[in-house]
Image (cartoon, rainbow, N blue to C red):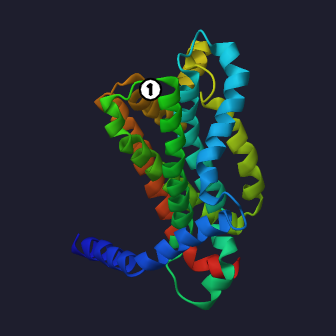
Amino acid sequence: MTQKIALVEQKIRVFLKYKTLLNELVVRDIKVRYRKSVLGLLWTVLNPLLMMCVITVVFSTLFRQNIPNFPIYYLAGSLIFSFNSEATSNGLYSIIGSASLIKKVYIPKYLFPISKVLSALVNLGFSLIAMFVVMIITGAPFHATLLLMPLPIFYVFLFTSGLSLLLAAATVYFRDIAHFWGVFVLAWTYFTPIFYPVTILPSFAMKIMQLNPMYHYVSYMRDVVLYGTFPGMKENLICFLMGAVALVIGLWVFYRKQDRFVLYV
């Protein structure tokens, strides 16, 4: 037990030692993404707004009787889902893309996928501005439960971090995962009720939907933003456990395989 505590303390000290480097990696990712872009970071606000306009025109007509305030319904779900898809899609290339640095100096390798998650988190923060702007324009009420919005973001951060670590490690050995993941995310998008009401699904589909982690995170976000309700203890426990389990599995796989990364990158 004492050895395990000492090991955890050592990992924390290493993390704190390289915290500045992690910050630099996050800043670099953001700068590279918007390099030579005239509007720069403003795209983190404009992009969800433009997508919302397109989706609203197409789907609000289909579901206008089922979904009140469709723009907020869509944004509350899509921003959470986009954070996950952006972080994981960038994270799976994080080790391969840093091969030259990994071969030259010692750096805790988990910093690379985690930096992708954090840079996506920064983008999410800016994108939330777009949602608040639309809430003002549409006259949506600002419920007190908005103060609880960090909770679903924290839960999905845990889940996304674990998934990114797992994908980053797996992609080093199986490069085809990078191609498969794009198709999987597309299918995952349609399997998550982002632009359609979950009420249109038959009962057997709802049972399957309960196994979709992003369904829980998207629903949680809508509860605190759009409906002004706080999910019960059971839903909080489900969201936390899904995130924690994903993180533990991701860390376990990553640490078991990281010593051999240098042979494959």
Residue 178: horizontal and vertical position, in percent?
73, 57
Looking at the image, how many numbered discs can be counted on the residues? 1
Question: Taking 245 as reference, is 95 left or right?
Answer: right
Q: Does residue 71 sit above or below 85 in this rendering? A: above
Q: Is residue 207 above or below residue 118?
A: above
Q: Residue at x 47, y 30 (%)?
A: 136
Residue that lies at the very extreme toward the bottom in this rendered image: 104
Decide if residue 116 is on the left or right side of residue 34. left
Where is residue 6 shown, x and y percent of the image? 26, 77
Q: Residues within 10 Å of mark 1 (few under 14, many from 20)?
A: many
In this view of the protein, which residue sits in the foreground, 236 or 115? 115
Task: Determine whether 251 is above or below 78 in the image.
Answer: below
Q: Residue at x 53, y 16 (%)?
A: 68
| Quadrant location of the N terminus in the rendered image | bottom left
Q: Quadrant of the C terminus?
A: bottom right
> Residue 19 is drawn in which quadrant?
bottom left
* Left or right of 180, for residue 245: left
User: Which residue was labeled with disc 1?
Assistant: 226
Residue 214 showing in the rendered view: yes
Mark 1: amino acid: Leu
Residue at (59, 72) in percent of width and height? 28
Q: Indicate the position of residue 75 as horizontal and vertical percent values.
A: 56, 34
Q: Does residue 256 appear anywhere in the picture?
A: no
For residue 11, which quarter of the picture?
Answer: bottom left
For the residue pair 263 and 34, the one nearer the viewer reads as 34
| Element class at badge 1 | helix
**Which residue is rendered at x = 71% and y = 23% of the image?**
57
Where residue 264 sits, quadrant-wise, is bottom right
